[in-house]
Image (cartoon, grey):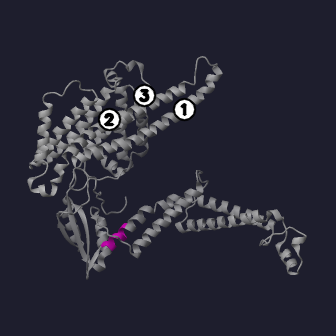
């Protein structure tokens, strides 16, 4: 569900702004409405964080892929001073290299002596090859400077690389807290001697916040959100679906406050899409093994745990799909070839897989419309949503007929159901009182019906992308094992086996990566676009974030 929010205004004396902000931070349940805070305190805090980031980047760049022999704790400014010296020496090195390259053809002459002779009126260019502009040092001295600069640069790099970046990184949460704190202080609007800070708090915590604030001498005003306001969205899925909060955060999406929490259907269908798009039980088993390793290493990490839960579910579903389709790293297990599910999914005409995809798509979209109807049960517009469910079912039947899954003419019930569904959509989708402002939506009905047909057809991507992944795996297997032939000599097959292993590793590695990319593109799209359009979820919200110290 989406947690109900209450708008909060906190009042205090202007001179007590910092104490008020500290009190709100200690409560840890208030979402602050930050304004564009660009005061000196915020700029200084952001500057400290930027310097820390620059220092860490300097350490990692100097270190490269090498591990330091020792670790030195150095402050941000110490690292930056060393980095500045390194940059100055690098610039000087380029200048000296340019001088050496320019004057090397003239040999190691003394420019001071040459200048003295020229001042005496001796025309040196008639007896020696000298440059028009004399160097500042003789060539041997320039080469000595070049070697000294190179040694200094290497020493600076070693010193920077030996610095412990973790000591600097450990200050990041403190710096982030400082920026947030100063931003909150600057966001307080002053009205004479009174300062006001606005924010949002979960309705169930509103009274506790009021009591805590009043105990600290703060004034509090709580009210329900008004029309036109956009409170932050705090999603609280059922217990077994809480990991979806991390997935939403990772995707950077959040339903708007007045929309629905779609965590449950999102996770159920996303799991199915994940398995079908990866399409290979071997890849699923590999992901499952990596996830078990993750559980062992990061079990106590609160950030990693939700992702480990998700990957456990997704990889298990992929293994299950491999069992149903008998697909393991692009190969099949002979003893499983006679399983009913393997024969059904392996239909050479591909009609079975297309039928499955269209059925999944229709169920997904019809679920969205029936859910809308249930949430609108007290309004006549619920009939319009039921009408849309009927339209989607007819479009599903049409799609299956077009590709030859359903043979023969349309059944007798099709046209009456289609006509009644369209009539319900036309008559009840827009309330009568809103016809003046939303009447144009009815004129778009023919296009929306065709769009519904396209939405169902788009689910065929589950079959197409999954099949492509399997075929790529099969082709890499054929390419790899095609190198070895019984006609070859034993020593030749032994040499070619190394190429076989390399092709298998590279080929399946690339295919594995592409499978992950296809999940990000297609599984996410089907949930956040096709399903969400029919459910009415715009993903235009912003997540609730309690103002508190970093844990």
- Between residue 446 and residue 26, name the one nearer to us: 446
- Prevailing SS of the magenta stretch: helix
Category of crowding for the residue at label 2, using alpha-carbon neighbours closer than 10 angstroms: few (below 14), some (14–19), many (at least 20) = many
For mark 1, what is the residue?
503
Question: Badge 1, how many Cα within 10 Å: few under 14, some, many 20+?
Answer: some
Q: Secondary structure at mark 3?
A: loop
Q: Is residue 183 magenta?
A: yes
Q: Is residue 29 magenta?
A: no
Q: Nearer the viewer, residue 83 or 375?
A: 375
- Whether residue 316 appears in this view of the structure is no
Residue 328 circle label? 3
- Cα distance between the residues tagged 3 and 2: 22 Å
Q: Which residues are magenta?
A: 180-187
How packed is label 3: few (under 14 Cα within 10 Å), some, or many (20 or more)?
many
Q: Position of residue 146 (x, y in %)?
A: 73, 64
Provide residue 453's location: percent of width, then percent of height: 25, 39
Sequence-wise, the earlier of marks 3 and 2 is 3
Q: Quadrant of residue 220?
A: bottom left
**Which residue is rendered at x = 80% and y = 66% of the image?**
139
């Amino acid at each position: 569900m989406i947690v109900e929010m209450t708008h909060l205004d906190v009042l205090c004396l202007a001179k007590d702004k910092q104490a008020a902000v500290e009190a709100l931070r200690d409560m840890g349940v208030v979402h602050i409405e930050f304004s564009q805070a660009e005061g000196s305190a915020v700029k200084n805090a952001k500057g400290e964080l930027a310097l820390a980031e620059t220092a860490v980047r300097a350490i990692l760049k100097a270190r490269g892929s090498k591990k330091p022999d020792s670790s030195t704790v150095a402050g941000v400014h110490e690292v930056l001073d060393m980095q500045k010296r390194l940059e100055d020496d690098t610039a000087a090195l380029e200048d000296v290299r340019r001088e050496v390259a320019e004057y090397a053809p003239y040999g190691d002459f003394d420019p001071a002596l040459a200048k003295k002779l020229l001042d005496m009126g001796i025309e040196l260019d008639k007896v020696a090859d000298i440059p028009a502009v004399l160097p500042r040092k003789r060539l041997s001295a320039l080469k000595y400077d070049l070697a000294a600069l190179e040694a200094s640069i290497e020493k600076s790099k070693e010193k920077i690389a030996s610095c412990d970046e973790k000591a600097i990184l450990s200050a990041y949460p403190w710096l982030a807290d400082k920026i947030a704190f100063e931003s909150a202080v600057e966001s307080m609007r002053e009205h004479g001697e009174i300062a006001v800070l606005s924010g949002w708090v979960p309705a169930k915590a509103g009274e506790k916040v009021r009591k805590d604030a009043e105990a600290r001498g703060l004034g509090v005003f709580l009210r329900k959100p008004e029309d036109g306001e956009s409170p932050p969205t705090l999603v609280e899925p059922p217990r077994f679906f809480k990991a979806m909060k991390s997935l939403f955060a990772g995707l950077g999406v959040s339903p708007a406050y007045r929309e629905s929490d779609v965590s449950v259907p999102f996770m159920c269908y996303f799991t199915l899409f994940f398995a079908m798009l990866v399409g290979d039980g071997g890849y699923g088993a590999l992901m499952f093994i990596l996830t078990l390793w993750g559980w062992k290493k990061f079990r106590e990490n609160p950030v990693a745990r939700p992702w480990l839960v998700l990957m456990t579910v997704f990889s298990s579903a992929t293994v299950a799909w491999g069992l149903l389709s008998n697909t393991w790293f692009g190969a099949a297990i002979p003893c499983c070839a006679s399983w009913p599910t393997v024969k059904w999914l392996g239909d050479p005409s591909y009609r079975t897989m297309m039928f499955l995809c269209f059925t999944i798509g229709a169920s997904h979209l019809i679920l969205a419309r029936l859910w809308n109807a249930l949430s609108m049960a007290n309004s006549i517009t619920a009939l319009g949503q039921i009408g849309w469910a009927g339209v989607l079912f007819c479009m599903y039947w049409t799609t299956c007929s077009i590709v030859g899954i359903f043979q023969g003419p349309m059944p007798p019930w099709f046209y009456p159901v289609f006509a009644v569904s369209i009539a319900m959509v036309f008559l009840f989708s827009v309330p009568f009182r809103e016809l003046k402002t939303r009447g144009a939506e009815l004129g778009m009905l023919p296009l929306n019906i065709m769009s519904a047909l396209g939405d169902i057809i788009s689910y065929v991507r589950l079959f197409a992308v999954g099949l492509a992944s399997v075929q790529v795996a099969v082709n890499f297997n054929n390419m790899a094992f095609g190198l070895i032939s019984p006609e070859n000599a034993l020593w030749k097959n032994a040499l070619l086996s190394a190429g076989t292993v390399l092709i298998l590793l590279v080929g399946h590695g690339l295919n594995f990566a592409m499978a992950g990319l296809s999940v990000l593109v297609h599984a996410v799209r089907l949930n956040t676009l096709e399903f969400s359009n029919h459910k009415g979820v715009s993903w235009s919200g912003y997540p609730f974030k309690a103002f508190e110290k970093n844990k």
